[in-house]
Amino acid sequence: MKLSGKTILFIFLALLSGFFCWQKSADAVETNHIIINEVMTGKSGAADWEFVELYNPTSSDIDLSGWTVKKKSSSGSETPLVSASRLQNKIIAAAGYLLLANEGGYSGSVVADVPWPHSYTLAYKNNAIVLYDNNNVVIDEADWIEIAEGYSWERTNAGSWQNSASAGGTPKAANSEGAQTPPLPPPADNSSSLPPVNPEPTTTTPLADQINVNYRLGDVVINEFVPDPADEQVEFVEIYNKRNENINLDGWFIYDGSGAQTILSGVIAGSGAKKYLVIEKPKGNLNNAGDLIILKQGDAVIDQVAYGDWKDGQIDDNAPTASDPKAIARTGDGYNTYNNKNDFAVSATITKGGANIISDADAASDAETRYAASLPQGNSSDIIINEILPQPRGEENEEEFIELFNRGDKEIDLTGWILGDSSTRRYAIKKTDAVNSGVARNDTIIKPQNYFVVYRRDSKIALNNSGDEVKLYPPDSETPAQTVKYEKSVEGRSYNVKNATSTPLTWEWSEVVTPGAPNIIQIKHAPVVDFGWSGEPVVGQIIFFDGSDTEDADGDNLTYLWNFGTGATSTEPNPIYIYFKAGNFSVSLTVSDGEHTIKEEKIIKIKAAPNASPVTVSTNATTAIKGVKIPGASAAKSSGSTGAKTNGALRQTTLENIRELAKGSYAKVEGTVAVKPGIFSTQYFYIVGSMGLQIYNNKKLFPALEVGDKISVAGELSESYGELRLKTKVVADIKTIATSTLPAPQDFTAEEIGEETEAQLVRVSGEVVDKKGSSIWLDDGNGEAEVYFKQGAKINRENINEGDKISVIGIVSQSNDKYRILPRSQQDIIMESGSAQTGEVLGAVSASDSWELAQNNKKLKLIQYLLVLSGGLIVVLAGVIWKRKK
């Protein structure tokens, strides 16, 4: 079929219009996923007033179950911010917002939807937020170099980022139009007019050759300039890149107050020495008395500085001017409060193309006026306080120190830097400081990745053991660049930076002190040694010694050494011993974790066996057997009467009401055994019902019990580490009423673990967010709960990793001011999702494995001792028979 001319023209126009429609939609910013829309990193006086706003630009509601939010440091390391458990079942509506906030710091009128732990904080510099979906795929990321204090970091409609127009941001509302670009100042008297709003460069740069990135006010700053150079030198303006990325300067310009335009080109680097760019002999002239310098990207003002007597309508906040041969420089590289008077100072040390050094103009000699060619280069922000020793072992005046570290890649001269504490004491680092109450230094240059140690004997700064602050001031600055605050110190431990090459800096105490060397974060806790015994302490009676109450917070492998006071020893954790002589014996248990060795001693009183005649083993023996008694199934002495009535009236009550009684009261309650003796401790176990209660006997006198037994217990109310317990005296204080069904755990949230749930059998599900020593921490979206693994529970925690989602069943135990969940066995740890199979009991082993055989250790050892004892008796009897035959 032949098409007419009109038809062809119509088709052509239709296709052409479709092209333009497609082109328009392609240029628009369209997003089909949840985005990070706004970030707040604190405000003045409240650094933890933080939030992250998510926005759903799609037309459908989205379930965030399984999603996570993490923060990323400048080094690229990621740490949790909002765990998956906190986002479980959270729905973000179509075109709706979800507000995440610091639960301990944010208190805005707009209520947060999801809190994150107070200790998880954001930095206003060099941080990022990363959003992951339930498949651990990155959905969105927002990063920033520096957010203005008190303002939020918000996404624009074009997809770029900006500071909010007003303090506090716009949580759960449309973002603002951004921080307003400061208006250009009016022309000064007797000066040329300012550059036009839309200046036409003398030489244009094609748009296609520019990188289509719009930068914001303060991303690049005017860092240093010299309007009145020394002889043989020239005027220059130095700019500094505050972003951690290379910036293409095509289309950028510098203007002076007369409107003279200097065209910039090339790239200013995001790191190293090339973060500085020097423009020599800019167009026009920088007036000595005062002028204006403006840095622009196209029409957008990126930075501007008015100095001297330049009349911009706010002359009081102008930067100072400088005469030959001095510079006007920011007090720290990139330091910017948007107040020129605060940000700039006159310096006799010109650092053209390098880190600013503000030196006293009156005290500086010509030799101190240096240029980049002779100056050790580096960024002043690379100098950090790295290690503090407030309380050394021995003489504090000799060994107390403050260590600085250069984390950059260039040398830096520390001349003029100042250290101080919370008092008015200050110590200035100088090449010769005899008048500074210190010792003269010959070298103040700190090399890259190196250390500079200042001892108390030099600085005269005495750090308080009870807590103090250490402050580091750049040269000629009254504002510290860094302040480190520590709480009560411990003798021989230093306070160390854990992450010197990233921000924000985090600190931790260490027992390994390393002045002038890399930090070693290591605190090895000594084991807490405790032991007891069961069985009647009678001559010839088998006594079971038990060291399972010994704990080690680091989860180290422990070695045991028992001494029974007779010269006999054992290296078993739970040995068996028989005394053949009455008397008081000092029993000691020495436990080592490889670094600490702790010894505990107790006296055991061995009574003579009743109605037993002595048998002489040897004419030279010093130990006599006065009778051997082989115990039955129970080594404990039974009695038909209770020992709980010795003082006061015995009161029948319930587990729910027993907490209303005073300490020292005598009470009788009923409950179901939730954990047997010997699991958490050989001296106590737990019963549960409407509530729970710890049952204690210091002599470990318990009848045979099984989980699920319903029992009655009579005893005296007492307290240990803040936890209520019922203390029994004899075995008869505990009576089995019936064999019940196994107690079922009650479900609680992490934040409910506390006084109200003490001693109860609970179940908490959540994400493992931390793992240290014998503990892990679960976050279920409502809070965090500590899970502590007692040695007697024999739980393999190697398969539990951060990020795993698990359910934990256990008893809530109080330890002074904190509460912990104590699982009873491996079966109390169930994997919900993670590295192990879903529903798998973590670390479960077969019945043939050695850990389960350990449950029968006492029986095995008893058989061994009976065999040895039988052999001994046979030898004795054989000796007697042989003597009679003679």
Image (cartoon, helix red, strand yellow):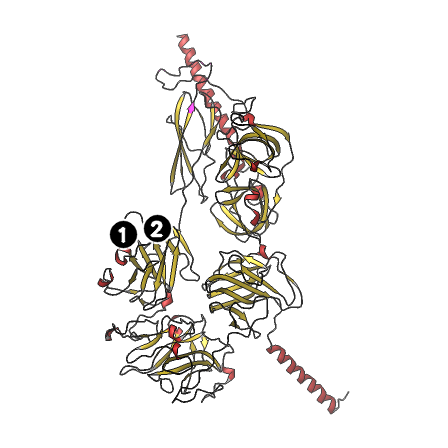
Question: Which corner quadrant of the image does residue 462 belong to?
Answer: bottom left
Counting other residues with Cα less than 10 Å from the Cα at mark 1, is it few (<14), some (14-19), or many (20 or more)? some
| Pick the front one: 361 or 208 | 361
Label 2 and label 1: CA atoms lie apart by: 13 Å
Q: Percent position (x, y) of residue 801?
A: 52, 51
| Residue located at (67% from left, 68% from top) | 59
Query: Callout 1: helix, strand or loop?
Result: helix
What residue appears at the point 45 percent right and 71 percent down from the top-left corner? 243
Q: Name the residue under label 2.
A: 465
Callout 2 environment at 10 Å: few (<14), some (14 to 19), or many (20+)? some
In the rendered image, the residue lying farthest to the left is: 434
Q: Which residue lies furthest to the bottom in this view?
A: 5
Q: Where is residue 295 in the image (x, y as percent from the top left)?
A: 43, 80
681 w.r.t. 616: above or below: below
Task: Give the foreground label among 2 and 1.
Answer: 2
Query: Which residue in the structure is indicated by mark 1?
Result: 397
**For residue 263, what is the image quadrant?**
bottom left
- Position of 858 compared to 7: left or right? left
Quadrant housing residue 745 = top right
* Image: magenta residue range: 605-619
Q: In this view, does 679 lie above or below 731?
A: below
Left or right of 835 in this view: 428: left
